[in-house]
Amino acid sequence: MTKTNDQRQIQSDFDLQQKALGRRKFLRNTGAALTAGALVSMIACDKDDDNDGVSFGSGDFAILNYAYALEQLEAAFYIQVITTPYTGISTAERSLLTDIRDHEIAHREFFKAALGTNAIQALEVDFSSVNFSSRDSVLMTAKAFEDLGVSAYNGAGRYLASVDYLLLAGKIVSVEARHAAYIRDLLSNGSFADSTVIDANGLEMSRKPRAVLDIAKTYIKTKLNASSLPA
């Protein structure tokens, strides 16, 4: 698969980030005043998949894993959309939805690589409520995912301690907003930035992590433990 400009830019950002974040800076950005031994212990606990569900971890790891979960969901959805295209899909729609699929896969892989051994597991999704042969069903679900994703990044950015991660999150949410605008116009021309997502001050809606997961859980079969995420 040929990489898009966005994919190449994300990979470049990630490479630069990896070079920039040495072990010392990593420890500072996560937090904290933890000793290396305590950090190892924390990571081990974070990866437990016990009866309380998959934990997101702590600090920046929790926010990055939260974003990783949402990107897993979006990537799985668009993979299914392109694998089983809806009835009457146009050439232009298929081409641009393929671009969106590739972006979401790139986002998913970016977080997986950035988190390394601290990444949560691959999540099992549930799209039983989506009729993939129906244009309306697919595009309404896509609109819900894109609007939710933009509000999720806007709501979670404040919790990131690392400026590097915040910068990268800003680049990703910009792409998600472009997706949302396109999907919205497919459903209703001119609705790309209406009052349901942008307030009177021209600001995009934001949602805190637990509120986002309450909405997204309909489509995620894997049990998640959001107790370490901001309410």
Image (tube, rainbow, N blue to C red):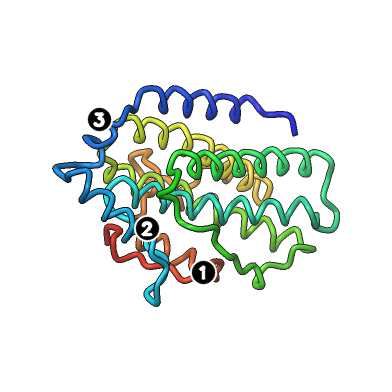
Q: Amino acid at mark 1?
A: Thr
Q: CA distance from mark 2 to mark 3?
A: 23 Å
Quadrant of the frame with the C terminus: bottom left
| Label 3 residue SS | helix
Tell me the quarter of the picture where residue 132 sits: bottom right
| Nearer-the-camera pick, 94 or 107 | 107
Residue with the mark numbered 1: 222
Q: Is residue 22 above or below residue 151?
A: above
Tell me the quarter of the picture where residue 230 sits: bottom left
Q: CA distance from mark 2 to mark 1?
A: 13 Å
Q: Residues within 10 Å of mark 3 (few under 14, many from 20)?
A: few
Q: Is residue 124 above or below residue 88?
A: below
Q: Residues within 10 Å of mark 2 (few under 14, many from 20)?
A: many
In percent of width and height, residue 91 lies at 84, 41
Q: Residues within 10 Å of mark 1 (few under 14, many from 20)?
A: some
In screen coordinates, is 16 left or right of 26? right
Q: Which mark is first along the chain, 1 or 2?
A: 2
